[in-house]
Amino acid sequence: MARSTSAAPKESPKEGLQRNLERGEPASYEQALSELDRLVEQMEQGQLPLDRLLDDYKRGAELLAFCRGKLEAVEAQVKVLEEGRLKPWTGA
């Protein structure tokens, strides 16, 4: 598979770390999912330098953990609301 010869701008490891620190924790599940989708799309294009690819992979793992945590919290709330029995959702 041939890759484009145009290279993305080189980013130092310090710049990558700073970029991840600036991102912080997402404000919501939807924001995290949106950022995760964007990261996956960029990674699939195969145009990122290796250092940035690694930083973005780490960020993606953080976002995935955040989303899973939010979903688990919602599931726990639903179990409480349904008196400890998780009932199937019909999707009305």
Image (tube, rainbow, N blue to C red):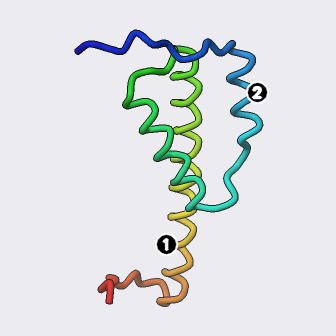
Quadrant of the image occupied by residue 45: top left
Image quarter in which the N terminus is found: top left
Q: CA distance from mark 2 to mark 1?
A: 34 Å
- On the rendered structure, is 63 left or right of 19? left
Whether residue 6 is situated above or below residue 64 in the rendered picture: above
Whether residue 85 is situated above or below residue 64 in the rendered picture: below
Name the residue at 53% across, 22% down.
54
Image quarter in which the C terminus is found: bottom left
Whether residue 33 is situated above or below residue 19 in the rendered picture: below
Of badges 2 and 1, nearer the viewer stands: 2
Q: Position of residue 9 (x, y in %)?
A: 60, 15
Label 2 residue SS? helix
Q: Position of residue 75 (x, y in %)?
A: 49, 72
Q: Nearer the viewer, residue 80 or 20?
A: 20
Name the residue at 49% across, 89% down.
83
Q: Which mark is residue 18?
A: 2
Residue type at tag 1: Glu
Residue type at tag 2: Gln
Residue at which label 1 appears: 75
Q: Position of residue 91 (x, y in %)?
A: 32, 84
The mark that comes first in sequence, 2 or 1, is 2
